[in-house]
Image (cartoon, helix red, strand yellow):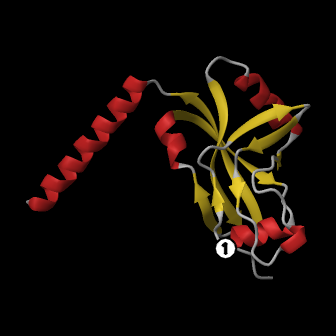
Amino acid sequence: MAEKKSQNRTIAQNKKAYHDYFVEETYEAGIELFGTEVKSLRQGKANLKDAWCSIQNGEIFVRGMHISPYEQGNIFNRDPMRERRLLMHKKEIARLFGLVKQDGMSLIPLSLYFKGSRVKVQIGLCRGKKLYDKRAAEAEKDAKREIERSMRAK
């Protein structure tokens, strides 16, 4: 039998999360979607910019994620900003709930991608950056860019 290769095709990434937070750990979760939402994702119409995750009653939800309505979806289209349930094991959710209760920790969706035919979300357990952390990261990035530029010139 031929083995099925798992191909990951990125739909959307949350670059703002890496600017605003230190990512401590990452987790993979499935997401509960409707058919027209999946069709819209196949066209690449998703935005994770202002998205975050919350845990309620032992379930984890992603909020603020925008999936544009599917053009041919008519009455079957859902609200683009609705909260969507993430699919993770109960023990993982309980562990994350304990970690999020600590000061300064939050769950932020980092990327949305297809793994085979399934849609997956990469969630980051994040700690917020202060303004001086952001400035230091920007200075480090500029220094690397300058080094690369000088190396290419020689």
Q: Amino acid under label 1?
A: Gln
Residue 116 seen in the current view: no
Residue placed furthest toward the left: 154
- Element under disc 1: loop
Left-right relation of 107 to 23: right
Whether residue 135 is situated above or below residue 116 in the rendered picture? above
Residue 45: percent from left, percent from top: 65, 66
Residue 136: percent from left, percent from top: 33, 30
Residue 3 seen in the current view: yes
* The N terminus lies in quadrant: bottom right
Whether residue 21 is situated above or below residue 85 in the rendered picture? above
Label 1: how many Cα within 10 Å (few below 14, some 14–19, many 20+): few
Residue 96: percent from left, percent from top: 75, 31
Q: Quadrant of residue 79 in the image?
A: bottom right
* The C terminus lies in quadrant: bottom left
In front of the other: 76 or 136: 76
Residue placed furthest toward the top: 103
Q: How many marks?
A: 1
Which residue occupies 76% across, 71% down?
70
Q: Quadrant of residue 139 in the image?
A: top left
Which residue occupies 19% across, 48% down?
146
Left-right relation of 67 to 146: right
Left-right relation of 39 to 17: right
Which residue occupies 61% across, 37% down?
25
Residue 6: percent from left, percent from top: 69, 69
In front of the other: 97 or 55: 55
Residue underneath mark 1 = 43
Residue placed furthest toward the front: 74
